[in-house]
Amino acid sequence: MSSTSIDDLLSFEEERPAPVEPSRGGRVGRMLRPVAGVAAVVVVLVAGLRVVGLRVSLPVLVAGVVALFLVRRVVAALAPPPPSRSGGRTPATTDDDGTWNWGARDALRAAINGWERPLDWAGKDRERFAERILPRIGELADERLRQRHGLTRESDPERARALLGDRVWTFLSTPSRRPPSPRDLAAIVAELEKI
């Protein structure tokens, strides 16, 4: 049996990207790639314009394509670095200003939002709570029972009821007249974690 908490069940970890190998070809390769790109775009534009029946001066067309490539390169150089894929906070400078980077992908934030929004949405509506939240809590209870004891509520109801306790079993099997208070819900989650 493993000791897995509900936090472990709600979290996710992304795979780390493979290390990028330095490009080969050296200085000549770095010079030829943009020139080949400009030439390819110019050839496509000339062919497309001739199909339509338009004629544009070749030096003007080449200058325009070169200008677009330069603008693209300058914008790429000035753009901020992409957000970290590891889910952690990437400091922009070495000194910490004490604020949280809300734009970073954070597994804990994603897990909290996965519960916070539906709980808020179903906070006062019994039908929404029974339709959206109760099945999720039931899935967590089944997963916890499966990991720790090798059963689910459906596969062995009597043993599952004994392991869950009367309070959690009644909560999951009998829809209440009103959604539980945050205190009651916290107590039920605490009992689920004890399983």
Image (cartoon, rainbow, N blue to C red):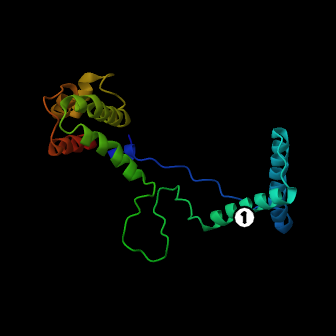
Estimate the x, y position of residue 185 in percent, counting from the top left.
Answer: 19, 41
For the question of whether residue 39 can be seen, the reply is yes
Image check: 31 left or right of 175?
right
Q: Position of residue 93 (x, y in %)?
A: 49, 74
163 relative position to 102: left or right? left
Which residue is more in the foreground, 38 or 109?
38
Q: Quadrant of residue 190?
A: top left
Nearer to the camera, 109 or 58: 58
Q: Can the viewer see residue 22 in this picture?
A: no
> What secondary structure is marked by label 1?
helix
Where is residue 31 shown, x and y percent of the image? 83, 65
Badge 1 local density, few (<14 within 10 Å), some, or many (20+)? few
Q: The N terminus appears in which quarter of the rendering?
A: top left
Which residue sits at x=29%, y=45%?
116
Residue at the spot x=31%, y=34% of the render? 136
Closest to the observer, 78 or 60: 60
Quadrant in the picture for residue 27: bottom right
Quadrant in the picture for residue 60: bottom right
Vertical placement of 41 versus 100: above or below? above
The residue wearing badge 1 is 70
Residue at horizontal 24%, vertical 37%?
A: 122
Furthest toward the front, the residue is: 54
Point out the residue furthest to the left here.
Answer: 177
Q: Nearer the viewer, residue 52 or 13?
A: 52
> Which residue type does callout 1 highlight?
Leu
Q: Quadrant of the C terminus?
A: top left
- On the rendered structure, is 182 left or right of 193? left
Q: Position of residue 97 (x, y in %)?
A: 39, 74
Count of marks, rendered view? 1
Q: Is 44 situated above or below 29?
A: above
